[in-house]
């Protein structure tokens, strides 16, 4: 395989219709620039896997390793060494049978998932050295998915990298890219305008992101499906490994903003009334679930009886596996910072009840999954058609 890049098994969402492949040169090479985040971010790891899987239907895909804030050779070496040391630490402590090491056990599982399903790409980019030579002949640089354009946590130099300003404009596109916020910082507006004006095509994840692109640059942007939704449930099940015993009946919770005692008690009462236990992702009080890796996250959703969450990707996997789910307003976050545009887009695309429960009501909305599945197939077709045009 050229330059250590490795193809994925083609995504089965394409298996019923091969005619679209005739217009795409499957010898092409694609580089994904996304957030290289293994710190408790299940959604990031799974969208990364999904986008590589999606692009592999059209050629060979790899995820570019982005070294943030590496402005010179010395800092690049330190960041690289720190990243490698962190991986070794996770590997060692992840095997120590000590309850205090639950965090490392979980992070070791995330590391193993990345190594197995995404891999450590030989292609790198940094402020210090730009794009490595083995990435300079990539046919397309695909920016996204996830919050790659969230300028709250990036220097201006790294923001320019996340916007693809290191490569010729005809090679730069985005797929399901997100700002993660409703507006960008005033001092960054000029950078966004210049970068967006030069992209070949722009695909975003939210309707607010589409509006922002148009406000900042006048360019047209298209809302496409998050890559996790482009991979069918049967494909997701192939990466699971029996983390959850068959026949276990449980309410699955996944809260990124914490959970109040009132809400927790309501969920416990709901579970008891429906003959379920409660499985809690990212909650150390449930150590059996806490150590779940990304593939186990998928399995937990696939086997859940009900889901309670404040997470966007939890909604995506609930929809993929036809689960009854309740979305709660995220606790501990100011109203203006809730970043619910992604939820609103998802609910609008699938004509769901857009209200998010702000209290502790665990009543499960009735969802017509026959209709939702048909709409998901339609939205996949729209997104796939757009992607094929963008990759030409």
Image (tube, grey):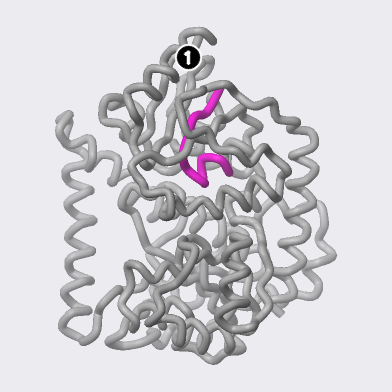
Nearer to us in this view, 224 or 21? 224
**Around disc 1, counting alpha carbons within 10 Å, would you say few (fewer than 14), some (14 to 19), or many (20 or more)?**
many
Is residue 184 in sight in this rendering?
Answer: yes
Nearer to us in this view, 3 or 160? 160
Q: Is residue 197 above or below residue 243?
A: below
Nearer to us in this view, 342 or 84? 342
Q: Is residue 347 above or below residue 137?
A: above
Element marked by disc 1: helix
Q: Is residue 109 above or below residue 339?
A: above
| Percent position of residue 161, x then y | 41, 81
Q: Magenta region: which residues?
A: 306-316
| Percent position of residue 275, x then y | 51, 8
Residue 83 occupies quadrant: bottom left
Left or right? Give the position of 129 relative to 8: left
Q: Residue at x 54, y 78 (%)?
A: 141
Q: Quadrant of the C terminus?
A: bottom right
| Percent position of residue 180, x then y | 47, 61
Nearer to us in this view, 42 or 91? 42
Q: Residue at x 46, y 49 (%)?
A: 43
Q: Is residue 226 above or below residue 375?
A: below
Q: Which residue is mark 1?
A: 271
Q: Residue at x 47, y 43 (%)?
A: 311
Is residue 116 in sight in this rendering?
Answer: no
């Amino acid at each position: 395989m050229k330059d250590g890049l490795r193809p994925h098994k083609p995504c089965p969402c394409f298996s019923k219709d091969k005619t679209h492949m005739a217009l795409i040169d499957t010898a092409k090479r694609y580089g994904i620039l996304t957030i290289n985040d293994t710190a408790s971010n299940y959604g990031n790891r799974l969208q990364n896997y999904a986008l590589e899987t999606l692009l592999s239907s059209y050629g060979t895909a790899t995820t570019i390793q982005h070294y943030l804030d590496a402005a010179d050779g010395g800092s690049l070496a330190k960041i690289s060494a720190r990243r490698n040391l962190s991986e070794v630490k996770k590997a060692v402590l992840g095997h120590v049978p000590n309850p205090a090491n639950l965090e490392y056990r979980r992070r070791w599982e995330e590391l193993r998932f990345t190594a197995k399903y995404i891999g450590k790409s030989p292609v790198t980019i940094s402020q210090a050295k730009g794009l490595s030579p083995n990435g300079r002949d990539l046919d397309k640089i695909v920016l996204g998915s996830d919050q790659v354009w969230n300028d709250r946590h990036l220097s201006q130099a790294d923001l320019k990298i996340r916007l693809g300003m290191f490569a010729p404009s005809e090679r730069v596109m985005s797929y399901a890219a997100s700002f993660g916020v409703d507006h960008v910082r005033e001092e960054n507006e000029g950078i966004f305008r210049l970068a967006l004006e030069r992209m070949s095509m722009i695909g975003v994840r939210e309707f607010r992101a589409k509006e922002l692109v148009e406000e900042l640059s006048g360019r047209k942007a298209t809302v496409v499906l998050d890559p996790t939704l482009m991979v069918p449930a049967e494909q997701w099940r192939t990466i699971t490994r029996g983390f959850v015993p068959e026949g276990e009946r449980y309410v699955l919770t996944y809260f990124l903003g914490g959970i109040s005692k009132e809400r927790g008690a309501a969920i416990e009462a709901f579970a008891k009334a429906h003959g379920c236990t409660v499985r809690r992702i990212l909650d150390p009080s449930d150590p059996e679930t806490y150590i779940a890796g990304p593939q186990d996250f998928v399995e937990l959703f696939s086997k859940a009886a009900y889901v309670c969450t404040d997470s966007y990707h939890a909604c995506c996997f609930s929809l993929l596996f036809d689960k009854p789910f309740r979305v709660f307003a995220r606790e501990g976050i100011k109203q203006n910072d809730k970043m619910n545009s992604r939820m609103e887009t998802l609910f609008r695309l699938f004509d769901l009840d857009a209200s998010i429960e702000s209290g502790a009501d665990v009543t499960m909305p009735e969802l017509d999954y026959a209709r939702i599945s048909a709409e998901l197939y339609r939205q996949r077709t729209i997104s796939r058609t757009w992607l094929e045009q963008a990759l030409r």
